[in-house]
C-alpha cells in the first residue's frame, strides 16, 4: 500500500484489505489464483466515503443558527467533511479525535471494505439493496464469509476481541445476537505472531463460529429514534472496567442482577415478537390501535378499546413498556453498585419525559450507557413530537434508522452525488 507522507495509517483498512486478499487466495484454485495475482498487479483504487450518520455535526448546525432537528441535519450534503472534538477535550497535546455518534463506524467501514473487495474479486456474490427475500437467503453463505473475514480484520485492527455485535450488525442488519467464543479468533491473533496469513485465513474460514444470530426487527409502524445529547461522551472501556471490578468484588449480587437484566431483555424481545405476530395475523386491528395510540399518552391507550384483538395489542404494548422500565431500573442499580453512571440522572429525567409523551413505546440509553446517546421507539407518526421535544432539551435526533437487511450493493453510485474534501483514497500498488 502507498500512502501520502501526510496521512496516518489506518489499521482497519489495512487489515480489511490484507485479510480479503488472503481469503481469495485461500479459496481459489490455481487458475483463479493466477488471475487474481494479475489483477492485483494492475493496482486498485479504493474510495471510502463516510456516511453522515456516523459523525456528529451538531457544531455545524449550531454555527449556522439552525435548530437541533433532523430536518436541519438533512440539509447537509452527503459525505460532509468530518469534524473533530475540541483540542481542550484531548488535553491540547494531541490531534483532536473525530467527533462520532458512536454507531460503530470502524466496524461498518471494515465490513464495507471487506464486502466490496470480496465481491469485486469474485469470492462472494452480494445482493443489491432491492433484492427479494429469496435472493437474500441464497446469499446467506456469502454473508457468512464476509462476516468471518470482517470480524477477524476488525479484531486485529483494534487489538482485542470484542463482542463482535457491531460487525455482525453491519453484515446482517437487525438481529438478536449472542457473541462467539473468543477462541474462534485465536488463529487471527496468531497472524500477528508471524503465522502465514493464508494459513490463518484457512483456519478462520473452517473455524467453529458458535455465535447465535436470530432474525429480529421492530414491529410494523414503529420507528427507532437515536438522539445525541451533546453533553460530552462516556468512556466505554472505563465504564465496562468498573462494572467488571464490581462483578469481581461482589459476584453473588452482581450475578443475580445480570440474571434479572437478561430475563427482562428476553421478555422485551418476546413482547416485540408478539406484536409482530399480531400485526401479521390481524393487520387492520393492529394498525388501528397503533394509529390511535400514536396520538395518546400511554395512560390513555386502553380507553375506548372493546374489541378483543385490539385489547390484546394494547395489552402487549403496555407490557413492553413495563418491561423497559424494569430494564432501566436494573441498569441504574447496576451503575450505582459499580460507581458509574450507566443511566445518568440527566438522562433519567429526559427518558421519563420521553416515555410519557404521546405515541412513545420505549426510551432508554443504548450500548454501555452513559452520556453518549438516548433512544426511543415511537408509534405511527409520533416521531416529530419526540424530535422537537428533544431539540428543546439540546438533544439532536439523528437521521439513522433501523435496517434489517445489512450489507448489500447499493443501486446508485454515491460518487454521482456531491463529494466533499472528506473523501480520500487508498492506493494498492
Image (cartoon, rainbow, N blue to C red):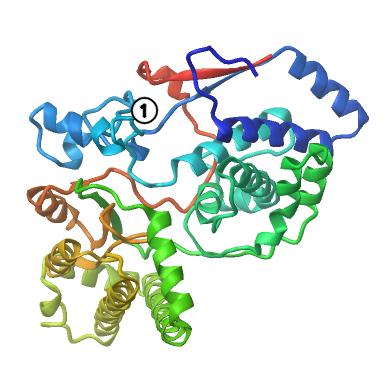
Q: In which quarter of the image is the N terminus?
A: top right
Q: In this view, does 63 lie to the left or right of 236?
A: left
184 or 67: nearer the eye? 184
| Residue found at the far right of this picture | 30
Residue at point 14%, 41% (across, down): 68
Q: Position of residue 297 (x, y in %)?
A: 11, 71
12 or 54: nearer the eye? 12
Any part of residue 148 in sight: yes
The residue that label 1 is drawn on is 95
Q: What element carries label 1?
A: loop
Count residues near mark 1 (Cα–Cα under 10 Å), then give few for <14, some for 14-19, many for 20+. few
Q: Position of residue 356 (x, y in %)?
A: 12, 70
Any part of residue 86 in sight: no
**In the image, residue 382 above or below residue 111:** below
Q: Is residue 108 left or right of residue 391?
A: right
Residue at point 37%, 39% (across, down): 54
Q: Where is residue 244 in the image (x, y as percent from the top left)?
A: 46, 69
372 or 172: nearer the eye? 372
Residue at point 75%, 19% (across, down): 40
Q: In this view, does 182 lie to the left or right of 402?
A: right
Q: Quarter-wise, where is residue 3 in the image? A: top right
**In the image, residue 109 above or below residue 311:** above
**In the image, residue 57 above or below residue 142:** above
Q: In this view, does 354 lie to the left or right of 279?
A: left
Q: Quarter-wise, where is residue 239 in the image? A: bottom left
Q: Quadrant of the C terminus?
A: top right
Residue at point 54%, 49% (across, down): 167
Q: Position of residue 255 (x, y in %)?
A: 46, 83
339 or 290: nearer the eye? 339
Amino acid at each position: 500500500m502507498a500512502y501520502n507522507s501526510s496521512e496516518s495509517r489506518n489499521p482497519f483498512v489495512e487489515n480489511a484489505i490484507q485479510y480479503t486478499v488472503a481469503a481469495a487466495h485461500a479459496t481459489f484454485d490455481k487458475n483463479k489464483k493466477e488471475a487474481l495475482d494479475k489483477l492485483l498487479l494492475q493496482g486498485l483504487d479504493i474510495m471510502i466515503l463516510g456516511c453522515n450518520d456516523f459523525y456528529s455535526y451538531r457544531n455545524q448546525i449550531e454555527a449556522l443558527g439552525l435548530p437541533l432537528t433532523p430536518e436541519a441535519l438533512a440539509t447537509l450534503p452527503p459525505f460532509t467533511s468530518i469534524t473533530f472534538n475540541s483540542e481542550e477535550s484531548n488535553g491540547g497535546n494531541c490531534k483532536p479525535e473525530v467527533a462520532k455518534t458512536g454507531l460503530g463506524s470502524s466496524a461498518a467501514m471494515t465490513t464495507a471494505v471487506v464486502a466490496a473487495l470480496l465481491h469485486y474479486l469474485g469470492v462472494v456474490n452480494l445482493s443489491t439493496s432491492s433484492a427479494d427475500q429469496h435472493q437474500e437467503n441464497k446469499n446467506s453463505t456469502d454473508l457468512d464469509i464476509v462476516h468471518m473475514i470482517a470480524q477477524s480484520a476488525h479484531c486485529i485492527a483494534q487489538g482485542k476481541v470484542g463482542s463482535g455485535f457491531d460487525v455482525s450488525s453491519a453484515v446482517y442488519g437487525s438481529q438478536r445476537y449472542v457473541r462467539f467464543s473468543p477462541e474462534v479468533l485465536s488463529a487471527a491473533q496468531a497472524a500477528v505472531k508471524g503465522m502465514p496469513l493464508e494459513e490463518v485465513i484457512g483456519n478462520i474460514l473452517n473455524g467453529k463460529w458458535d455465535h447465535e444470530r436470530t432474525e429480529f426487527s421492530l414491529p410494523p409502524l414503529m420507528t427507532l429514534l437515536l438522539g445525541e445529547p451533546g453533553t460530552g461522551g462516556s468512556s466505554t472501556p472505563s465504564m465496562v472496567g468498573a462494572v467488571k471490578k464490581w462483578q469481581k468484588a461482589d459476584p453473588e449480587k452482581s450475578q443475580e442482577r445480570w440474571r434479572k437484566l437478561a430475563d427482562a431483555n428476553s421478555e422485551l424481545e418476546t413482547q416485540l415478537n408478539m406484536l409482530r405476530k399480531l400485526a401479521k395475523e390481524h393487520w387492520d386491528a393492529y394498525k388501528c390501535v397503533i394509529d390511535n395510540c400514536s396520538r395518546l399518552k400511554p395512560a390513555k391507550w386502553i380507553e375506548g378499546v372493546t374489541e378483543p384483538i385490539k385489547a390484546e395489542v394494547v395489552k402487549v404494548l403496555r407490557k413492553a413498556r413495563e418491561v423497559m422500565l424494569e430494564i432501566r431500573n436494573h441498569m441504574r442499580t447496576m451503575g450505582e453498585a459499580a460507581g458509574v453512571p450507566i443511566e445518568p440522572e440527566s438522562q433519567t429525567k429526559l427518558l421519563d419525559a420521553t416515555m410519557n409523551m404521546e405515541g412513545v413505546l420505549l426510551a432508554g440509553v443504548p450500548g454501555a450507557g452513559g452520556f453518549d446517546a438516548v433512544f426511543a421507539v415511537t408509534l405511527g407518526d409520533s416521531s416529530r413530537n419526540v424530535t422537537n421535544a428533544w431539540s428543546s432539551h439540546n438533544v439532536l435526533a439523528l437521521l439513522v434508522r433501523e435496517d434489517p437487511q445489512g450489507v448489500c450493493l447499493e443501486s446508485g453510485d454515491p460518487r454521482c452525488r456531491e463529494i466533499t474534501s472528506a473523501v480520500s483514497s487508498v492506493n494498492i500498488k
